[in-house]
Image: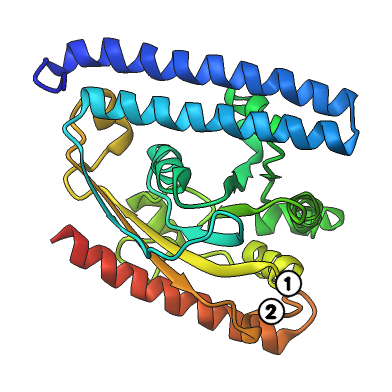
Amino acid sequence: MLSFLPSWLIVFITVPLFLTITAVVSTSIFILGIFKLLLPIKPITVVLNFVINIIWRGWALGNLFAMNLTNPIDWQIDCPDKLNKKSWYLLICNHVSWVDIMVLTQLALNRLPSPKFFLKDELKRVPFVGMAAWAMDMPFMKRFSRGYLEKHPEMKGKDIERTKKSCEKFKNIPTTIINFVEGTRFTSTKKAKQDSQFNKLLNPRAGGIAFTLSAMGHLFSGVLNVTLNYPDNAEPAKDILLGRMKRIQVNVELMQVEQDVIGDYFSDAEFKSRFQVWLNDIWLKKDKLLNQLSN
């Protein structure tokens, strides 16, 4: 609607708008999170979680309004019709930009149960965002490099312990567990550093989703393999603030949870190898799809 305005002017609309929406919603959710902490009584917690989810929906709708107000976005969402908001799903996705989070909340808004993102531990310290994520019981993952683990072997498996604790909280309420499997946003520099075999993706990290499937696979109605693409915008984060976002492509594949992908990833070497082949095959197909979408 306002995309006809010059970019230098649009940024003075989008930035305050996104910040205001996030600040108001996050503060409200954080306050309710404090009540959850002080009053850990199940009926009260259920009601508070219900209210928190309503407020989250307000945040998602507010962001949708802000994005469409300042950008001429063509939303291209290819998603199965038969998704159940009263079920559980594991959603795996490639990671391009912080814009991905806002896009996935739009996908989840009227199609999926409450989304819970696996977030980097550093996001705890981000004003408003960290507070709200904590109040919504979103898991914070602290990944350690191989070099760090060699020096501090006592830290091995700590990220999986966090995953286990988070999964316990999700068993009582329909949830979409969202994991950016690459662990970080895609850049050409990171791709080169990893010597990634993919053209538009980083190497997937299997441990977190393998454990989630092991802990909750019996609850999941399926695995949602989501591919995000911004074919006309090399810098989505910058472009959406400047009113330049043209197309957002979201492709969703619903995969059944087969018994072959449920097992002990950390003790069973044969299963670990089989699981990595399964995930790499998904990533190869995702890379091919991204090449097709970008043409």
* 108 sits left or right of 6 in the view: right
242 displayed left or right of 205: left
| Label 1, label 2: how far apart the Cα atoms are | 5 Å
For the C terminus, which image quadrant? Answer: bottom left
Q: Is residue 203 visible?
A: no
Residue type marked 1: Ser
Q: Position of residue 191 (x, y in %)?
A: 39, 58
At x 71% / y 35%, what residue is drawn?
A: 49
**Which residue: 65% across, 30% down?**
52
Verify CB contact (< 8 Å) between mark 1 and mark 2.
yes
Q: Residues within 10 Å of mark 1 (few under 14, many from 20)?
A: some
Name the residue tied to disc 2.
262
- Sequence-first disc among 1 and 2: 1
- Up-down relation of residue 251 to residue 130 (above or below): below
Give the residue type that dot 2 points to: Ile
Picture coordinates of residue 151, whole percent (x, y): 79, 54
